[in-house]
């Protein structure tokens, strides 16, 4: 299968991928992905709450949308694509490196995301994929980033170097929580 993110960020500056084989059906994993809530991830709530401290306070994360995907959308991401039971792609356009990046978000229709440019801004696209694999499912998340002008590229790469370990930890925690939820549903 071609990489879903290539449709949205054809030349990424950087990215990360995490995956986990889960011994549950793709349907169970998809359901768990779409019902995983912030309350299922207290440590993730703390990490994301730290990012929100200037605006909301760390406890605000736990009271957000009923699913992690909806929480991401409420925090400025928007859905770029989805194929039910297979994948969902979320995108964001922002000055991520700013302390209050939520005040510097932009949006565009999904069909314009690939070619959307705005000096001083960067883009991020993330996919959650559910892939049938033998007697189970491979759950994969991948994130790519890009920026079009030199200043935004430099700032985004500096931010990415700082945030990537935490982003990776959050993604791995999410994968394991989805696996646990799929096993109990």
Image (cartoon, rainbow, N blue to C red):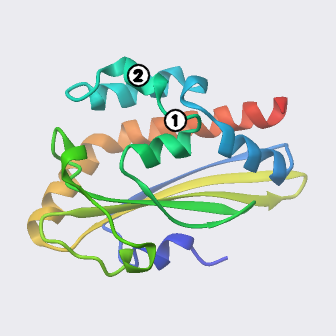
Residue furthest to the left in view is: 151
Give SS at disc 2: helix
Image quarter in which the C terminus is found: top right
Are the residues at dot 1 and dot 2 in contact (C-beta closer than 8 Å)?
Answer: no
On screen, 160 above or below 112?
above
Q: Nearer the viewer, residue 167 or 65?
A: 65
Which residue corresponds to the image point at 25% horizontal and 41% vertical from the top-left? 162
Which residue corresponds to the image point at 52% horizontal and 35% vertical from the top-left? 65
Q: Which residue is mark 1?
A: 65
Q: Nearer the viewer, residue 133 or 181?
A: 181
Give SS at disc 1: loop
Q: Which mark is residue 46?
A: 2
On screen, 97 above or below 83?
above
**Is the residue marked by circle 2 packed among few (<14), some (14-19), or many (20+) residues within 10 Å?**
some
Q: Is residue 26 left or right of residue 119?
A: right
Q: Which mark is residue 107?
A: none
Q: Nearer the viewer, residue 121 or 24?
A: 121
């Amino acid at each position: 299968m071609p990489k879903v993110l290539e449709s949205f960020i054809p030349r990424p500056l950087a990215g990360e991928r995490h995956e986990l084989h889960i011994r549950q059906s793709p349907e169970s994993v998809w359901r768990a992905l779409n019902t995983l809530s912030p309350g299922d991830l207290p440590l993730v709530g703390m990490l994301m709450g730290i990012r929100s401290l200037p605006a909301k306070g760390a406890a605000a994360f736990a009271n957000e949308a009923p699913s992690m995907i909806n929480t991401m959308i409420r925090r400025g991401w928007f859905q770029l694509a989805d194929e039910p039971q297979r994948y969902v792609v979320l995108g964001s356009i922002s000055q991520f490196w700013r302390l209050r990046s939520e005040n510097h978000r932009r949006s565009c229709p999904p069909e314009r995301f690939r070619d959307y440019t705005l000096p001083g801004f960067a883009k991020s696209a993330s996919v959650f994929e559910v892939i049938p694999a033998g007697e189970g499912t491979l759950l994969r998340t991948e994130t790519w980033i890009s920026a079009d002008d030199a200043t935004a590229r430099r700032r985004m790469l500096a931010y990415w170097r700082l945030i990537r370990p935490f982003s990776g930890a959050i993604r791995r925690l999410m994968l394991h929580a989805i696996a646990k939820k799929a096993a109990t549903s």
